[in-house]
Amino acid sequence: MLIKLVLVLFFGALLLLASADVLLNFARSSVAENITRSALMLLLSAFALLMLTAIIKSSHYLIGQVRHFFSASQRLQRRLFFFANKQAQFAELVTQQRQQLYFFKQQQQRQLLNKNNRQQVEALSKTIQHQLIMLKPSLSAAAFKRLQTQHKRYRRQLNSEGLIDLLHTIESLTKC
Amino acid sequence: MKPLRHWLFSTCRFFYAIKTKQLQWHTKHHAQQARLKHAQRLAHQEIIETLTLRGAQLEHDLAVLKTTHKAQLLMLKTQCKQDIKDYQAYLAALDKLKVAIQASYQHLPEAVAFTIHHHAKQLLNALWIAETVEEKLRCELRLIHFMNAVHEDASVSFDDADALTSLPQKTLALLQQPLL
């Protein structure tokens, strides 16, 4: 309705401007001036009305959008998304917690194993050292030094297999 | 002036005709419009009911999921603790077995005693890192079999005084077998 009114005002203003132009040809300048002023007023009113219409329409649209946002169906849909999202988040959290548990379990097992390995290496090293000292008189200085170096290296590396092999070697040398 | 008036009247008539047509259309389709609006309202109501039900269902599902996972996590935590305790117990048992076999076979070279212990520990680690249940079971059987052999050898030497010069034959035979 407002748009119609704007159009009527606009075309009315155009009509008045055209009539003012016609009157100017008949040298009725004062009347033409008044008509032009009225036409301009009409044109201005048309623009003002147009702006008012735009504001009213925008407000209507905005209010409609806000009402739609807070409508029951939209609220329920958002609630559904919230729960679905929460479920996905929870599943992710559970997976991570499981991984964390497995990780800590592995860590604890590794610590226990390392502790046991260190104890074994200590015991092996003590035995090797003892047997090396016993064997020292029957060994050449170079051979003794080589065995001692190997012993120190394996001990530093916490290499149980190497130390066991070394112990086997020393025991075979003792038998000879 | 007369043509202008005529033109104005005809324009007004044209607008009135349009208005009349619009009114006629509205009168004709009023019932249908009302029916459609009613159907729309019903459909909207139905959607809201469905969404409410679905929301309640999801909320319930989430609560159930939380409870289930909480219980599962608790179970897993207990299982992990038990596994660690078992591992610790196995390591202690292996140490004891080494001491027992050293005590039983006093002439046994230290290297052999350490090799027995090392082999048992490797079997234990293989059991620990096994991923499938079948593999785990196989490794556990091998470890138990090995520990039994060591234990039997240790018991034999305790019972028989002549066995002081002999070696733990069963254990040494198992040592020859490859790990996996």
Image (spheres, coloured by chain):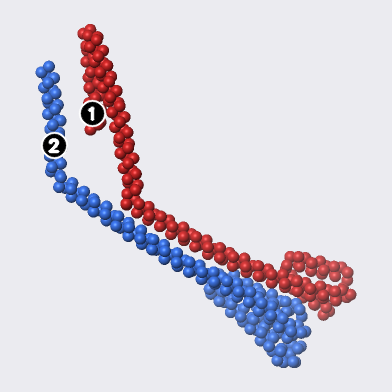
Chain colours: A red, B blue
Q: Residue at x 32, y 51 (%)?
A: A72
- Number of residues whose C-alpha sits closer than 10 Å to that of mark 2, classed few (under 14), some (14–19) or many (20 or more): few
The image quarter containing residue A26 is top left
Label 1 environment density (alpha carbons within 10 Å; few <14, some 14–19, many ≥20): few
Q: Is residue A63 above or below residue B105?
A: above
Residue displayed at 74% across by 84% down: B103
Q: Quadrant of residue B62?
A: bottom left
Tags 1 and 2 both on a single chain: no
The residue carrying mark 1 is: A5
Instruction: Check the picture and name the quadrant holding the C terminus of chain B.
Output: bottom right
Residue at the disc numbered 2? B21
Determine the chain carrying the residue at label 2: B
Residue A18 makes an appearance in the image: no
Chain of the residue where label 1 is placed in the rendered structure? A
Residue B45 on image: x %, y % = 26, 54
Specify the amino acid type for callout 1: Leu
Q: Secondary structure under badge 1?
A: helix
Q: Is residue B51 above or below residue A127?
A: above
